Image (cartoon, rainbow, N blue to C red):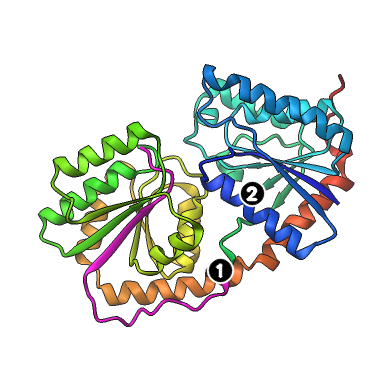
Amino acid sequence: MHVLILGGAPKPLGGVEVFCERASDAMQSRYPEWRVERMPTRTAFLTVRKVPAFIAGLDSLFEYRKQRPDCVWLQYTNLPDLVYLILARMLGLRVMVTPHLGSNWRSQSNSLLRGVSWWMLRFANRIALISRTQEVELALPANVPRSLIKTFLPHATLTGALPDIDRPNREIRLIHSGRLSEGKGTFLFVDVCQRLRDAGLSFQAQIVGGADSDTVARLREMIEHVKLGDHIMLRGHQSELDLLGLLRSSDILVHLSRIDSYPLIVLESMTCSVFPVCMELAGARDMIDTYGGHIVSQHGAVQETVDFISRLDINDVRHRGRDAARGVRTDYSWDQCASALETAVRLCVERDDASQTLSM
């Protein structure tokens, strides 16, 4: 089987890029006879300046046409990604699409773009969903077959020892991690820390992740303005192993994202016994309903997070985090995830007559 994974950017590594990397490693480990290749689509934050790189990526697809991959697995994060779907179908390639977006993303919240997205997705051979909630969040054409796959978590945290939770230190340790931005809730996290400090709560916080220089400058300025330098440590982008180490030493993940469809960092934190606090979105709600955590509303996210953290029993939270870790580790073992993906790929290859085709 020859699988071409399309999606994401060469750098920096965000959720989609990490997902592609782990999926490739898992498939090649479980099915060593498979040929798995990856190619970025370079569609994130597409601007006029980045159009030449986007077009070059489309041109590269013509080269892969000569190799005739059995399945092109496209990661759909924004509308330009679906241009790859149309081109691949015109080239006679089988395409399976996995959406990495939710109802708040522009291609879904804008009625015109939602209609365009739905029309373009009609030409996929199969849609592989990473969450049951995407069925109700996204505009998905009824004529395209579906598969439910799973996201891939770090192999090391699925198999390593669980962190020690019976530690005497009662100081709450907070963490926020991801590609830092307004939409991901990074600045709301600083608001939470300010209110906790003003309420006299003892805590330490970490912000982990990369961002553009303007965002980092704004973040540093905000932390300095509210005098939180003694409480918040900016860690920048971390390697997978270093991030897992930071998670293992934390108690609570504060993830007040307005845009994540199915936030990978929430499940990653759970495997490290970290208790998640998330804004109300379908994907995060599904994770927390299944394994545990706390949901806050979109309109009152900051104060509700502060109220919850202020009154919690830290030992109880640590033990609830440990219970969640066991469940997530079982359900997201790489064997299970690779098996679900393999089934979806084979169905895509075997049933490519189920959707419309395009010709040059």
Q: Amino acid at mark 2?
A: Cys
Q: Residue at x 50, y 28 (%)?
A: 45
Residue 180 placement, left or right of 265 = left
Task: Please identify the quadrant where the C terminus is shown.
Answer: top right
Residue 175 placement, left or right of 59 = left
Above-or-below relation of 291 to 137: below
Callout 1 crowding tier (Cα within 10 Å): few <14, some 14–19, many ≥20: few
Q: Amino acid at mark 1?
A: Ala
Q: In which image quadrant can residue 329 be found?
A: bottom right
Q: Residue at x 66, y 65 (%)?
A: 334
Q: In which image quadrant can residue 248 be found?
A: bottom left
How far from the left and from the top, in percent, is residue 54? 63, 25
Q: Considering depth in this image, is 224 or 200 the residue closer to the camera? A: 224
Q: Which mark is residue 20?
A: 2
Q: Per the image, is 173 magenta?
A: yes
Q: Give the total of numbered labels.
A: 2
Q: Which residues are magenta?
A: 157-181
Q: Which comes before the other along the chain, label 1 or label 2?
A: 2
Task: Name the residue tied to disc 1.
Answer: 156
